[in-house]
Structures are given as C-alpha cells and as structure tokens.
Amino acid sequence: MRRFAAVLLTLVLVLPSFVFAADESTLVGYSPRSSQTERDWESKFRAIPDPANLRENMRRLSAHPHHVGSAYDKDNAEWILARFKEWGLDAHIETFNVLFPTPKVRVLEMVEPTKYTAKLEEPAVAMDPTSNEKSEQLPTYNAYSPDGDVMAPLVFVNYGLPEDYEKLDRLGISVRGAIVIAKYYHSWRGVKPKVAAEHGAIGCLIYSEPQDDGYTRDVVFPQGPMRNADGVQRGSVMDFASASPGDPLTPGVGATPDAKRLSLKESKSLSKIPVLPISYGDAQPLLAALKGPMAPDEWRGTLPIPYHVGPGPAKVHLKLEFNWDIKPVNDIIAKIPGSIAPDEWIIRGNHHDAWVNGAEDPVSGTSPLLEEARALSLLLKQGWKPRRTIIYAAWDGEEPMLLGSTEWVEAHADELRQHAAVYINTDGNDRGLFEMAGSHSLEQFINGVARDIDDPETKMTVWQRQHLSQIANAKPDDRKELRQRADLRIDALGSGTDFTGFLDHLGIASLNLGYGGEDEQGIYHSVYDDFYWYTHFSDTDFVYGRALSQTIGTSVMRLADADVLPYDFVDFADTVQKYLKDLEKLLADKQDEIRERNQELDEGVFKATFDPRRPTVAPPREEIPPHLNFAPMENVVEMLTHSAKRYQKALSQRQTGLSEIQAETLRALNAKLIESERKLTNEDGLPRRPWYKHLLYAPGVYSGYGVKTVPGVREGIEEKRYSEAEQEIERVAKALEQESALIDSAAQLLEQAGP
Ligand SMILES: [Zn+2]
C-alpha cells in the first residue's frame, strides 16, 4: 500500500541547528574512533548489493499471484526463510490466523435507463507473461466491504471527501438511499464509503479516472505505464483509522490460534456499506447515463462525456457476497543478536504479500531487504559484530490492512515496549528522489545517512539531490530556510503501511523510506503490477533498488553500532514548535472563514450570485469557533527546546570520550533514549480510538493514510469539538513536559559521566 500518503511540507523560518561535532565526519553517537570503524564497515557493506540479485529476487517473488492465503504466498514465505537460513541467520516463520474475505459474488449492472453489465475483469495481455495467471488471481474487489444487495439511483460525488458532500448540499442533492460513484485518490479509499454511509448512501463504487492514473498522463499498459480501460485498483476499505488495523476479530491482541475472537457483527472495522472498485471502462457507461446538474468544473475528469452529478436516471444494482474465511499470515523473522547490547533492538521490515503479482508493491522493497540481509550476513562472516540486536522482518498480509505486522506487534507488545529502539519500514521502491518520513527525533540521523549515499543516476548524494529539488519547488519564503537549516525536514507518518503498529500503538521511533517520483505509474494493485511492467517502466536496471539496500542497510548498521543511540531532539523540538503554530493558524483561519461566510450571508452575496434557472442552496450560518488556550503547549515547547539543546551540547562535549564512559552509564542512557518516543504516547489513546496511543502522529479519521499531526487537537478543531481540543492541548502538553524531563535526565547522565 502506502501510495499517495505523502503530505506537502509547509516550512517556517528557524535558526539553523548549531554545528556540534568538532569533526564533521564523526558520526553522532560515536567517538571519533568508533566512528571510523563504523564508516569502514559501512563502506564494505555498500559495495555488496547487486542489481542482478535484486532482479532475480523480484522475478522469483512476483512470478505468481501471492495474496494472503494463496499457495504462492506460502511458497514465498518458505523461500524467504530458506534464504535467511542459507545466509546463516537465525530465522523462523511466525503465523497468525486472520479474517480475510475474498469475493464469492460480484454483480454490478445498470438497470435504467439502459442496460449495462460491468465486466469487472482485467484481461491478460499477450506480451505480459504473468497477466494470464487467471486461476491464481484475486478478482477485483475491496476487502472488508460487507455483503450486500442494493439497487438505487446513482450519484457522482467527485473524490467522495467531506467537502464534496458540502458542495452537493449547495447543489441541493442528497445521496440518501443512493449508490455513489467516487473517483480514486485524494483520500484513502476506505474514507469514501465511510463518508458516503454517513450521508445516507447505501452503496459505493470507486473508479480509476484517466485523469489521475490513465491516458491523460501517459500511454496505457502494455505500451506504456498507465492504467488501461480495464485496469482496477483493488484495496482494503477496513476502517482502520477509526478502530485499528490488523485482524478485525482480535483488536489489540495477537491473532494466535487461542486468541479470543469477536464475531463478525461485533467488529468495528468493517466498511458500513457495500463497496466495489471498477475500471474506467466500466464506469464510463454509468457516468454517461447520469443527468441532473453538471458537475462543478474541478470534479470533471477526462472521459469523453459530460460529467453530470445525478441523481439518476442511471439506476444500478450492486450485489456482493464474500467468503468470510480465517486465513494464515506468515511473517518471516530473522535475528542477528547484538554483541554488547542484545536487549536493544533495531527492526527493519517490508511486506511480502501482494494483491496480485505485486512486482512494484511490495517486491521492489522486499527484494532490496533480502539483499541487505545477505550483505549483513557477509559482514558477520568477516568479523563485524553489531552492538545491538537487529531484526529483519518480511511481513505477510499488509495489503488487507497491515495484518502481519500489526498482529506481530500486538503479540510481542511487552518485549517491544522494553527493547525496540527504532523500526525502519519500506514498502516498494521506484526511480527518483530519496523520500524520508518518520519520527522527528530521527530527522538529523536520517539526513546524515542521506548525505552518505550516492544517487545512481546523477552521482550527487541523494541528500543534495533532494535538497536542490526542494529549493527548486519551494515558495520564495521557504527557500531561505532550505538554504540555512542544517537538516531537511522529514514528513510525519500517517499510515498505509507496516510502521503503524510500531509507531502509533507502541510509540517506537520509526522511519518510512524509499526512492521514487520519477516515473508515472498506473498499475497500483492491478494484475499488471508485475515483472514485465517493472522491468519496462520503473527502475529497469535496479540501480535504485541497490540504492535502497545501501541506504537502509547503512541506517540499520549505524543505529545498531552507535555507542549512544543517535536520536536528536533539537529538530524534534523545532517540529513541535511548528505544529503548534500550524494549529493556532488552523483555528484562526477557520474563524476568519466562518466570519466571512456569515457576513456574505448577511450581505445577500449568495442570493445575488445564485442562477435562478440552476438553483443552488446557500451554505448554513455557523457559529464562529471560540478561542482556545494554547498556553500549556506554548510553555512546554520552550522547555522542550531548552532540554533538547542541553542534551545536544552534552553529547557533543562527550563525543571524544564516549568510548571511555562506563558500560553501565551507557546502558542507562540508551534505555532513556529508547523511552523518548514512548513518552509521546498516552495509555488511554486518542479520543474514541484507544488503539492509537501516539499524541503527535496518527492517520486521520477522515484522511486515512494522510497524517494528522497532534491529532487530538487538530481533529478536535477540524470537527468542531472545541472543548475536546482544549483538553487535548493539556494532554499533549503534559506528555511533552515528561519528554522534556526525560531529555534533561539523559543530558545529566552525560554531563556527569565525563572528565
Ligand atoms: Zn505495499
């Protein structure tokens, strides 16, 4: 999964982080001597990954469809296990039993004003040898749609976002009792049936519009990379953001054979109305049969039809039935024990299951993961001894909704809370820029890694390339910060892939990394995401696959070997400061917007601009949002900034003597650092969704994969629960105060440790 989760960075001016290392080449958390040893091992590592192996891994893993419960999914799991073992790693398969529905009946037909039966098929293409594995392919569907049999007039709802329904209200159109048809993208797919159901719709279709990933952008498959008229995006619509990801029947606990299971009815995470994804080939006749008002300009796509909204006269019949089976998911876990600090864990994962053949998603990430493990095992044979324990994981069941990783996290929650320092995730890989997202205490760290990796095509470092590209695309006001700030800002994590359980549920500092952005693609979650497509239209020579192995392997080694875990809190405090300003601006903008709209209502603006022949409805008058007291957060952010600088100074002053610090002190210091992300969680979780315990990062209830930073406060403001937002400010401030105290105590350990 993971696609289109990125959020744009908005930048504010800050002072540059001060330079703290006497010698710039000394790695943070290392003494000059241990840094040199580390750099030598890392260079050896980076010479090993081989594009020929990456290609061969992909060919093998994507040779057949390998969704949850399929024969080849199991076969791949055993093959991955055999590779880990062949390389001498201590590896095993861990199996969980999860609810995984597959389609039994899929009927979509237009019954009025003309008849049309949707094909719901992705045909084989002659030049693509794996597109014809029909008997092994999952049909096109949305997993965790309920069974249903509905017939109703159709309404076109653009992307199906909450604001699209506000627009429909203005047009005087209700979707109550209707079936809606929404375009893919601009929100996570599961949000579309969720919002539709909240507005009274009884069914939902989601189609891939050519403007978004079809012929408007480039030539369609197999001649080009884009989605053809039959291509369909499968995908999960589990309401994971309101409830939890993972097995819907065992929320909060591992789906082991003896786990207590909810009944299907009791589960909170299934979609509320039947939902089916379709191609634009199947969507076009339905859309063409709609009448009613023309869709607003920005809603219209590029099919050769007038885009009307409806309702009707198109009337459609949607009938869906699923096999509600319990299926195994097989996670492959490989361990490299730490030599000095075996109780501190660095975990690295990518999923191995796919919707169909999944060469891009996920194998373009799984294949580099395997190449990293092979390279690390070669270093072990040459005498490299990582200080900390390293765990490599190939997750199963990511596509249905992070099943394998979530169940593993829930089953091992106690030991992970105690031992896990960092989780690094990837989910596929393409050609282009290095994209960094994650916990902001790791921002400085991952910037450092990016400075040491060469971009395979331009030969500059991947950091330089990202930096210069951000300057090229920045607003004038933001360029100054880009040129002055030591580190590039990294995106916060929403969801959509396997870091979710680690970060949001347990508070384990996490990174999600990958290369991409250079090539267009329109095969996401279709049968055409396969070896033929990837080797013709993406990282065809696997040099970015090699760069991914080099980048992630370097990150894993650098985290595993550091004397002191390389967290940094100055960038973190700066980010929290920025979030606070964002929240204050969000509220002020909302107040301005409603004040202005109320005034326009008083002035009769809507009456004046209304076309009497095409009647529209004026927006409702709303109360202006109250002022909120941000003072608790404002005060604590200053405290946090102070503690962060104190820690950074203490660490830099001890840098040359790090190797002489007593083992016991180092152990205590690292234990505190591991705690630092946990302090940002609250045991009670977020309002109405207790599984999500992180107070700074969460997927949005109405954005899905898209992140909501400081979610309790932000969603309180967005959804007009102002007193709740104020309570959340207090909770966040309290957590940040404890964070600040922890950072101070870590600084104190360093201050007292040295000469
Ligand atoms: Zn994926």
Image (cartoon, rainbow, N blue to C red):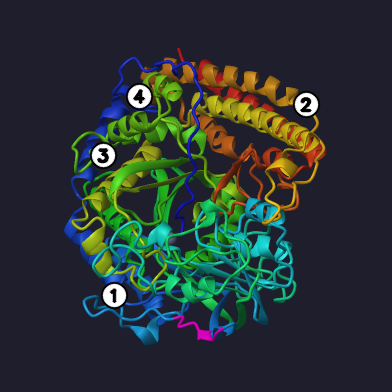
Q: Quadrant of ligand 1?
A: bottom left
**Residue at 68 percent of width and 43 percent of height:** 609
Of the numbered discs 2 and 1, the one sitting upstream in the chain is 1
The answer to whether residue 591 shows anywhere in this view is: yes
Circle 2: element type = loop
**Residue at 51 percent of width and 84 percent of height:** 116
Q: Amino acid at mark 2?
A: Asn
Q: Look at the numbered discs 2 and 3 and tell me whether their residues touch, using CB distance below 8 Å.
A: no
Residue wearing tag 3: 42
Horizontal relation, residue 690 to residue 230: left or right: right
The answer to whether residue 565 shows anywhere in this view is: no
Q: Nearer the viewer, residue 557 or 482?
A: 482
Q: Nearer the viewer, residue 755 or 154?
A: 154
**Crowd band around label 3 with a 10 angstrom C-alpha radius: few (<14), some (14–19), many (20+):** many
Of the numbered discs 4 and 2, the one sitting upstream in the chain is 4
Give the CA distance from mark 4 to mark 2: 45 Å
Where is residue 158, by image quadrant? bottom right
Q: Amino acid at mark 4?
A: Ser
Residue wearing tag 4: 31
